[in-house]
Image: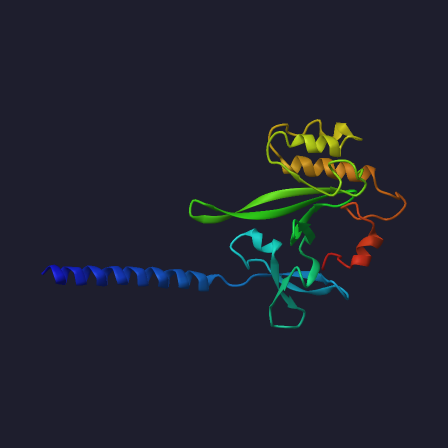
Amino acid sequence: MKRSLLCISFLFLTLIIFAQAKKENNKAMLVAPEFEKGWYLPYKGDTIKGEIQINAGETEVQYNISFLFKPVSVKKVSEISTKKARAYGFGDRKFEILKIGETDYFAEVLEKGRVTLYQINEEKMEKNRKVAVPVYYVTDAQADQKSKLAGMVQLPKEKPYKKALKELFQEQPMLIENVDKWHLQIDQVRQAIEEFNKMYQKDASTPTNPDGTKKEEVEKMEVEKVE
């Protein structure tokens, strides 16, 4: 009797595992690839236009590692890594190569100009699921090479993160008067950097884009927004 009960219990457990696995597989199959018009800039040659899959990974961390690309009039989808492209974008989003330590990432460009603000996501487990945690970096093209802002600076998420901003905005301190002192509010930081960059455009007579970059610079990079 005990042996029979044991066999029945084992069979029941096997059926549950099989049903759960089948359910997960069916769920995965229901997630159809979604594409959006995009482009990427190889290290050599002109911009390549096509479509980028926007649901390729579990979290947005995938955007910082590689992307799935389908050229115009081509059905085959290829994975493009940081070794094959130095920039890419879709919609209003743009990513550029950013070296952190010894690793190259596709960092999302949030603000562009004298001061550039980048975002990279770190993947962490939270309540048994993967989540993307944003990390922000700034570079100042005109920073004193002897200052702490020479090169690239990571913005801490909590106090005393504003110390980095104070040095960054030392020429225009009024721009960060209303920025939260305790916790990093990225929308506030973005607005301050946007205003800062407007003040330091090299040549006001040169046509510029909304992000503060000169049109000729964008044309040279050939990373115009895809219509």
**Above-or-below relation of 166 to 204:** above
- Quadrant (top left/top right/bottom left/bottom right) for the N terminus: bottom left
Quadrant assignment, res 220: bottom right
Going 51% across and 55% down the picture, which residue do you hit?
58
Q: Residue furthest right?
A: 205
Residue 190: % across, % down? 69, 39
Residue 223: % across, % down? 75, 57
Going 71% across and 26% down the picture, which residue do you hit?
177
Q: Residue furthest left?
A: 1
Going 31% across and 63% down the picture, which residue do you hit?
18
**Above-or-below relation of 208 to 172:** below
State how many labels appear: 0
- Quadrant (top left/top right/bottom left/bottom right) for the C terminus: bottom right
**Above-or-below relation of 14 to 162:** below
Q: Nearer the viewer, residue 152 or 162?
A: 152
Question: Taking 211 as reference, is 16 left or right?
Answer: left
Question: Taking 226 as reference, is 24 left or right?
Answer: left
Going 67% across and 60% down the picture, which residue do you hit?
38
Residue 136: % across, % down? 64, 42
